[in-house]
Image (cartoon, rainbow, N blue to C red):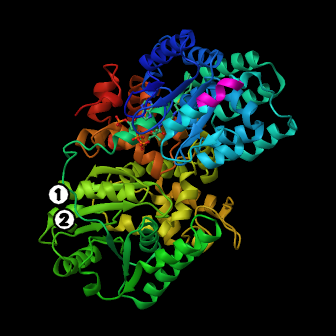
Amino acid sequence: MITVNNPPVNALSQSVREGLKKFIEKADRDRDCRAIVISCAGRTFIAGADIKEFGKPPLQPYLPDVIARIESCEKPVVAAIHGTALGGGFEVALACHYRIALNTAAVGLPEVHLGLLPGASGTQRLPRLIGARQAMEIMLSGNPVRAKRALELGAIDRVADSEDLLAEAISFAEESVAAGPRRIRELEVPAVDPQIFDAMRKEIAAKTRGLMSPELIIQCVEIATNSAFDEGIEFEREAFLECLASPQSDGLRHAFFAERQVGKVPGIAKNVVERSLDSVAVIGAGTMGAGIAYACLSAGLGVRLLDNDSEGLARGVKTIQDLFSAGVQRGKISESGAREGLKRFSSSQNYEDIADVDVVIEAVFESMSIKKEVFGVLDNVIRPGAILATNTSTLSIDDIAATTRRPEDVIGLHFFSPAHIMRLLEIVRGANTGNDVVATSLSLARKLGKIGVVVGNCFGFVGNRMLYGYGRENQLMLLEGAAPEYIDQVLVDWGMAMGPNAVGDLAGLDVGYKVRRERTDLPDDPRFYRVADMLAESGRYGQKSGKGMYLYEKGSRKPLPDPDVAAMIRQEAKRLGVEQREIPEQEVIERCIYGLVVEGARILEEGIAPRSGDVDVVWMNGYGFPRYRGGPMHYADTIGLDKVFERVCEFRERFGPMYWEPPEPLQTLGTSGGTFDGYVR
Ligand code: 3H9
C-alpha cells in the first residue's frame, strides 16, 4: 500500500514525486510484495502537479519519469481513486495497471484551464485507453468525468460497490496478480477517421479563440494515433514545456490562484459567526431583479419577489417561470427540480410579506433618491439582524446605509447581467458594514456558484470605476476618428470578449447616459462620453431601439457599421475642435488597457481593493477581460511596469494630465522594478 498524504489536495510536489518513486521501487524489489495499491489520504486522490512549482526551476525526479517507473513495475499496480484524480493525478492513475474508483469520484485532465496540456503522458495514454475522440473531448473541455461515465468510457476498470475503497482495491490487486500488469503504453489507439482532428478544430474554434494549448492537445492526440508511444511522449513533452513557458499559462495560473485568494479577505477572521441565509427577498422585478431571484432559487434558497407595480411584478414572475422552462429544455435542471424551485418562490406588492427574510436584495432603478426611499421602508419593516443589500452598480453604499438606523447590516451586492449566468459578485463593504455581513455575503456568493470579491465603497467600486477609464479612451478615440467597428475589432482580436461599442449597444446607451446625469463628479471635459451621450440623446439606445453605435436589422443582434453614426461623430468632432486622424491598433490597445491599469492602480492606492489579484478577478469574470492575460494588473506586470509607466507618461505629455497622471503605485513600482502583484499599500 502506497499512500500519498500531502494536504490539502495531494498535489504532486517534489517530495511526493520522490516518495512515489522510492516506494514503487521498493515494492518492486520486495519479494513478499505481489501487488501494489496507490491511494491517497485526505479529501481527494492526487489533484495534479503542484501548480505552485510551475515557473520555478524544475526539481527532480520529474513526473514523467516517476510515471514511467510506475508503469514499468513488474507487479500489478492498482490506483484507488476517491475525490478527484486530476491532471498529473489522473496521469499517475493511468500509469497504474488498473483503476478502481468510488462512485462519488471523478477523473479529468483540466490542464487546458491553466494554458497547459497533460504533460506526463496523458495525451498518449488516454487515447490508447478510450479512443482519440473521447480523449480529446476530456482534454479540451478540461471537465472532470464522473466515475460511472469513466467506467463506461473505459477510463477506469471498476466502480467500488461499497464505501470501502481500500478493501476493494486490495481485492482487485490480489485478483490482478494472475493476469499481471496491463500497460497502456502497449495498447494501440483504436482506429479513427483522420478527419476527426480538423472537425474538432472547427468545433472548438470559437470557444478557444486566442489560446495555444487546445491546438497542441489536438496535435498530441493526432500523433498518438499515428506514431510510436515514445515519439508521442517526446512531442508531448516539448509541447508541454512550450505551454508552460508561455505568458498565456502564466496568466491562467495567476487567475487560478487569484480566484482562490479573493475568498480570504484581510480583516475578516475565518471563524466569524455568519448570519442565517435561507430566505431572500428581491425588491424590483425588472430583468436584474428577476435574474437575481432565479439565481437564488437555483441555489436552493426561498425567494420572495417584490415590486409595487403590479404589471412589472407579473412580468418578473413570468421571466422567472420562463428561465425555469428554458433550464429544463436545455437539460440544466430536471422537471421536478424546476417544480421544486418554483414552490420556494412567491411574489408580493407588500413589504410586510417580506419582513422576516434573512437577506433583502434591492434591485430597483439606479437612482439614489429611489434607493434611499426603499431603504427607509426596509429599515422600518424588515426584522432586526437581516442583511439589507443593494444591487447598485455605482452609488455610494454609505449614503444608502445612512438612511437606515442599522448601517452595519447594509452592504452592496453588485450582480452582473444576466445575473443567473455571470460568475462575478462584487461585494461592497461600506464604512460601517459588519464583518459577519461580509462573511455571510461571501457564503451567499459561493452558494450561488459565483466568485465574490469584497471591495470598498467608491463611485463604481472596482469594476465600473475602471470601466470609465477604458470607456473614456474608447469614446475619445471615436471623436479622434477611429470607427466603432475598428476599435471593437482591435480589442476583440487582442482578446476581449466583446468590443466596448458592441457592449454599449447591448447594455443600452440610455443606461450609462442616465447614470452620468446622476453623477456630480464628472470631469470638466466636453469630449467626455460625448459620442455615447449624443447617440442616446438622439434616441439611439442600442440593440433595443434597433440602432446605437451600430445599426441592427429587425430581429438581428448583429452589429452593422452605420454611416450615419460616422457622419454624426465627424460633425461633433468638428464642433468640439477635435482633429480626426488614423489611430494605429497599438494605440487603441494601449489607451484602453492602460486606461484600466491607471484606474486600477488608483484603486490599490486607495485600498478599494486590497490586492491587485482582486482587481484582476473582477475584470476577468465581469467584463470579458481575457483570462489568459490574467487580468489588467497582471497583464501590466507581464509587460513590465517600467514600460507601462513610461507609456503613461508619454500619454500625459500628449493628451494632458487630466486622465494620465500616473498614480503613486505605478510611479513607485514602475521606477523600482516592482510589480502590482507584490504591492502592499
Ligand atoms: C498538471 O497536473 C500538469 C501535468 O499534466 C504535467 C506535469 C508535468 N497545486 O480549489 P480549492 C490548492 S497541472 C497546488 O479551494 P476545492 C488551492 O490553491 C494541474 N495547489 O479546493 C487551495 O489553496 P489555498 C492539473 C493546489 O475543494 C487549496 O489547494 N490539476 C492545486 O474547491 C484548495 O483548493 C488541476 O488543475 C494544485 N494542483 O477544489 C486541478 N490544486 O487553500 C486544480 C489546488 O491555499 N485544482 N490547490 O487557497 C482544482 O481544480 C481544485 O483545487 C480541486 C479542489 C477540484 C482539486
Mark 2, secondary structure of its residue: helix
Residue 635 image position (x, y, % from top left) = 46, 33
Q: Residue at x 30, y 38 (%)?
A: 611
Q: Residue at x 19, y 65 (%)?
A: 409
Residue 480 seen in render: yes
Q: Nearer the viewer, residue 607 or 447?
A: 447
Q: Residue at x 26, y 78 (%)?
A: 374
Q: Residues within 10 Å of mark 2 (few under 14, many from 20)?
A: many
Q: Residues within 10 Å of mark 1 (few under 14, many from 20)?
A: some
| Residue range highlighted in magenta | 173-179
Magenta-colored segment: predominant secondary structure: helix
Residues marked 1 and 2 touching at CB (< 8 Å): yes
**The quadrant where residue 505 appears:** bottom right
Horizontal side of residue 673 vs 195, given as left or right: left
Residue 534 image position (x, y, % from top left) = 50, 65
Earlier sequence position, callout 1 versus callout 2? 2
Above-or-below relation of 377 to 142: below
Residue 309 image position (x, y, % from top left) = 39, 88
- Where is mark 2, residue-wise? 409
Instruction: State the CA–CA distance, disc 1 to disc 2.
Output: 6 Å
Residue 411 image position (x, y, % from top left) = 25, 62
Horizontal side of residue 195 vs 567, given as left or right: right
Q: Amino acid at mark 2?
A: Asp
Q: Amino acid at mark 1?
A: Gly
- Where is mark 1, residue-wise? 434
